[in-house]
Amino acid sequence: MKESRSQSGHETRRNVFMTIGNLMHVISRLHFALDFDGTICPIDTTDFLLESFAEPEWRDIEERWQAGEISSRECLAAQVALIHASEEDVRRALSTISLDPDVPHFVAAARRLGAEVSVVSDGFDVSILPLLAAAGLDLPVTCNRMLPIGGNRWTASFSNGNEGCGSGTCKCASTADKQPLVLIGDGRSDFCLARRADFVFAKGSLAAYCAEESLPHLAISSFADALAFLPALISEMSPTLPASAETSFEDLNA
């Protein structure tokens, strides 16, 4: 009898260790791709810089993009060329912007569960990198570059594009090796990736798009909403985790 109980104890411990091993294997594959402008940052920092420093023609270019006459890459390149500002002007203006205060909490919670988190944006490094650093966020970033070329003028550089994609940064190509994938975004630059993602936390026009396309998603207004539903999402995507005590995955889009 004693030997039987001992064997049972060893079996239980072995099962626990096997469960933990399986859990880490599953969770380590889960990746959160975070959009920046309008998502991590409540405002669009590119529009902010254009409104602050660009010639007024940038709005005409914006209208052509919205009408589908030009691609996002063409729009951004033409708009950045209209900016007149020193590097110090840009730094000073951006220093007045704050990120969603719950982003660090979300990132910490996701990482505690073993998930990976990165920023994938069609915005510019000149805004994204200093604002993340100011918030104490150390995350991998894939984005466009905005480079000073002298005389308070700037040029846009796109090194993360993909043939057939009109965005400066192709979010699908940038996350091609990430699976399962959860997208957190807010607008048109996220539409393509939303179709490939396993789940979407969606703000703004992205929420409407996901609803129209019947994509698995939760409409959110901030990272506080995403953080509240994170345990239920993890439980659904990683069955080795215990289910959330109060919120089920089926409730997410109720």
Image (cartoon, grey):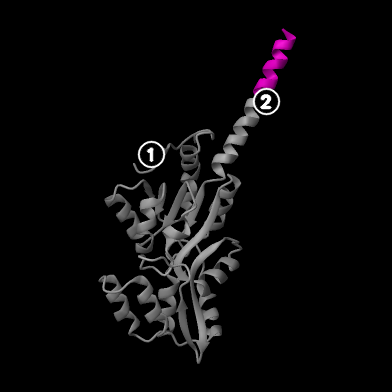
- The answer to whether 165 is drawn above or below residue 114 in the figure is below
Dividing the picture into quadrants, the one containing residue 54 is: bottom left
Residue 225 lies left or right of residue 15; in this view the side is: left
Q: Which residue is mark 1?
A: 251
Task: Answer whether residue 249 is visible to the viewer in this image.
Answer: yes
Q: Quadrant of residue 77 in the image?
A: bottom left
The residue under label 2 is which amino acid type? Answer: Arg
Q: Position of residue 64 (x, y in %)?
A: 27, 76
- Label 1 residue SS: helix
Quick one: SS at disc 2? helix
User: Residue visible at 35% across and 52% down?
Assistant: 195
Disc 2 target residue: 13
User: The N terminus lies in which quarter of the figure?
Assistant: top right
Count residues near mark 1 (Cα–Cα under 10 Å), then give few for <14, some for 14-19, many for 20+: few
Q: Amino acid at mark 1?
A: Asp
Q: CA distance from mark 2 to mark 1?
A: 34 Å
- The reply to whether residue 96 is visible in this rendering is no
* Magenta stretch holds residue 10: yes
Query: Does 46 appear in magenta?
Result: no
As rendered, which of 162 and 131 lies closer to the eye? 162
In the image, the segment drawn in magenta is: 1-12
> Which residue shows up at 29% across the image and 80% down it?
60
Lower sequence index among marks 2 and 1: 2
- Residue under the image location 58 percent in, 44 percent down: 113
Percent x, y of residue 135: 58, 64
Residue at figure coordinates x 39%, y 56% from the top left: 193
Residue at the farthest right position? 2
